[in-house]
Image (tube, rainbow, N blue to C red):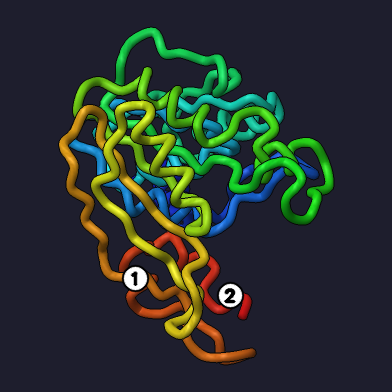
Amino acid sequence: MTRDAETILARREFFPRGMTQPEGGYRFSLDSLLLATFFKPGRSHVGVDLGCGCGVIGLGLLLNHPGIGVTGVEFDPLAVQAAEANAKYLHLPQQFSVIQGDVAKWRPPSVVDFVVANPPYRPLGKGRVSQGKGRADARFEQQADFAGFARCAAVALKTRGKFAFVHLPERLSGIMAALRANGLEPKRLRMVHARRDDHARMVLVEAVKAASEGLKVESPLILHQGKGRRTRLTDEALAFCPFLGCNRGREEG
């Protein structure tokens, strides 16, 4: 094996360590990594990562499913540059491409098999204000709200195509309404808890275009155990998302 090949394998093994992110912009967190392992595309499927940021979700999917192709759509030009750099860093530029575009307006040239997204969680005026426009756009629904993401996903997907995303449990009623309004039927749902005795912090959802009713609620995913300096990731969290292991030992309580 050549030194270049060894370097590429090492970079992929320790993903997402070494990822380029826009200076002063939004920093991806474990919600994106969880989505990259929650969703399982079919072999040779092609899809879109809406609001892809630095590309962490799409690249994570490619590492788990090498036969697929992903196109990222991102409004922030600095994030587009970071995503392109990360694809090259992992030696995946042929499988991962990036388009600068506004999710509220962008439409694909042809339908795809799947769409993934980690959309902004909070409406404008709700929650702590982020420093910097890039961070604000990623956290707050300034460029597009969830209904805009759902609408874009519905247009992009072929019939029976899948839309997978991560969001806040407290917004589920509006999320479900937006999915149904765009012909997307929720089929899988998994709540994510920081600890076993804590309330759900995130929800992972998979919807299918033009599908019949029938939602499967999977067992809760518990991320941490222990307190304070003894806090560590649970075995189930690491089994569900091995990418979390790259920062093992540095988890916050």
At mark 2, the secondary structure is loop
The percent coordinates of residue 156 (x first, y second) are 36, 19
Mark 1–mark 2 CB contact (< 8 Å): no
- Res 2 seen here: no
> Mark 1 vs mark 2: which is more N-terminal?
1
Q: Residue at x 46, y 38 (%)?
A: 117
Label 1 to label 2, Cα distance in Å?
20 Å
At mark 1, the secondary structure is loop
Pointer 2 residue: 251
Amino acid carrying label 1: it is Pro
Amino acid carrying label 2: it is Glu
Position above or below: 25 against 196: above
Q: Residue at x 58, y 34 (%)?
A: 145
The percent coordinates of residue 40 (x first, y second) are 26, 45
Indicate the quadrant where residue 189 lies: bottom left
Q: Residue furthest top?
A: 109
Indicate the quadrant where residue 238 lies: bottom left
> Could you tell whether 39 is left or right of 88 in the image?
left
> Could you tell whether 150 is left or right of 85 in the image?
left
Report the quarter where the C terminus lies: bottom right
Q: Residue at x 39, y 43 (%)?
A: 176
Pointer 1 residue: 220
Position above or below: 230 against 97: below
Q: How many marks can you see?
A: 2
